[in-house]
Image (cartoon, rainbow, N blue to C red):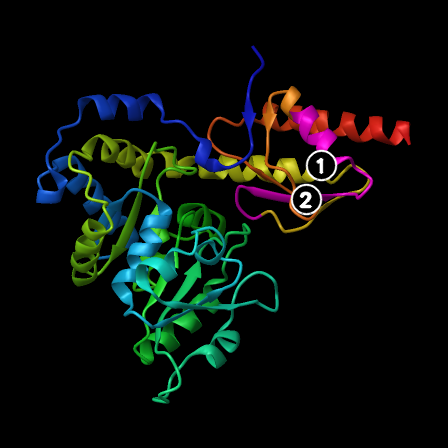
Amino acid sequence: MTRIIDLRSDTVTLPTEEMRQAMLQCEVGDDVLGEDPTLNKLEAEAAELLGKEAALFVPSGTFGNQCALLTHTKSGDEVVLCEDCHIVQHEAGAAALLSRVQLRAIAPQNRKHLTLAEVLPRLRLGQDIHYPRTGLICLEQATATGNLYPIKDMREIYAFARDHGIPVHIDGARIFNAAVALGVEAAELAALSDSLSFCLSKGLCAPVGSLLVGTKDFIERARKNRKILGGGMRQAGFLAAAGSVSLNTMRHRLHEDHDNARLLTELLTRFDGVSSSRETQINMVFVNINAKCDEAELLHRLREAGILTYAPEGGEWRFVTHHGITEGDIRQTVSVIGNVLAGQREIK
C-alpha cells in the first residue's frame, strides 16, 4: 500500500499508543458534576503549565474561543482583532450568533500581527452613546498564518488594555509551537492575557479537545457557558487521559515538526519559480509556485503519490508538518513536486 503523507493540517494527527493505553486504563466519572478525576487532573495540569488559576476542558478550539467571547463580553459589545485571525475567518460567524457581538477586524500593516498603534484608534474608550463598548481584544499566538506574535507587541497591547479595564483573550491553538520557536515557556505568553485557549488535537496528537485557562472566577462563569453551549461531556476522562499525555509528552517533540517544515521550505525554494510567501517559523509552510504551474495537475499527482494537501488559495500552497511526518516524507514530497514542475517545463 502507498504510504499516506498527510500535509493538510496538524489536525490529522492520530493518538499515540501511550494515549490509547491511558484512555483504556483511566478512571472516569461525571464531569458535569465535577466527579471525573482524570479530567480534573488534566485541567489542573493545564492551569499550572500556563500559569493560570484554573482551566476548562472543551470539545474544540472554536468552542474554546467562542466560550471565552461569551464569558468576557455582553451582547452588543465590540471585539477588536486581526482580520486574518481564526475567529474571523474560520469560526462560521459564531460570535454574532452566540455572543451577539460586533467584530472590529483590523488589517495589520505588516500583514502579520497587530501593534498597539493599530489597536488604539479602534478602542471605544469614551462614553459616547453612539459607540458600542469595547468588550474584548483577541490576539493569536502563533497566528493563523503561521507567524509568531512578537512578545513586545503583545506586552504593549496587554498593558494598555489592563490599564483601561479591557480583557485580552489569546487564541493559542498552537501556543506550544510558539513557545518552542520563541524559546520561552508557554506561561510567559499566557501571562499577557486574561484568558487563553489551546488545542490538544493538533500537533499534540490528542483525538479530541482544547482547554480554556484563566482566573477561577472566569473559568467558573465559562463552565456555565460551556453547559449552555452543550459542551458538558460527562465521562470525558477518556479524552482527558489522552490530553494529559499530550501535555506531558508530545509538546516536547514539536521542534521536530519545525525542523521538517524548514527543510521542506529550503528544498522547495531551490526550484525555479518556487518562493516562500511567508517566513517558516513553526510547523507551517507557505509557498508560491509560478503561475505557469498547472495547479490541478500538481494536486492530482501529489494525491496519486499518497501526498495530501489542500488546493492553493490565490496561488499560495500550505503544507503543515506534524507527528508522523518524517524527513523521508518531506524529501518524497519535494521529489514529486520537482518531477511535476520539470515535466511541465519540458511540455512547454
For image coordinates 66% across by 26% down, the residue present is: 302
Q: CA distance from mark 1 to mark 2?
A: 8 Å
Q: Can you tell which mark lies on residue 327?
A: none
> Is label 1 or label 2 in front?
2
**Residue lying farthest top?**
1
User: Dividing the picture into quarters, in which one does residue 339 lie?
Assistant: top right
Amino acid under label 2?
Answer: Val
Residue behind mark 1:
268
> Pointers 1 and 2 in contact (CB under 8 A)?
yes
Label 2 secondary element: strand
Which range of residues does the magenta coloring cover?
Answer: 281-302
From the viewer's side, name the closer residue of 49 and 273: 273
Q: Is residue 297 shown in magenta? A: yes
Mark 1 vs 2, N-terminal side: 1
Residue behind mark 2:
287
From the viewer's side, name the closer residue of 298 and 181: 298
Label 1 secondary element: helix
Q: Is residue 175 left or right of residue 306?
A: left
In the picture, the quarter occupied by the N terminus is top right
- Residue 256 pos. (x, y %): 50, 35
130 in relation to 138, above or below? below
- Residue 196 pos. (x, y %): 33, 56
32 in relation to 335, above or below? below
- Residue 113 pos. (x, y %): 53, 63
Q: Is residue 120 shown in magenta? A: no
Amino acid under label 1?
Answer: Leu
In the picture, the quarter occupied by the C terminus is top right
For image coordinates 28% across by 61% down, the residue present is: 70
Q: Residues within 10 Å of mark 1 (few under 14, many from 20)?
A: many
User: Dividing the picture into quarters, in which one does residue 274 lie?
Assistant: top right
Q: Is residue 109 left or right of residue 55?
A: right
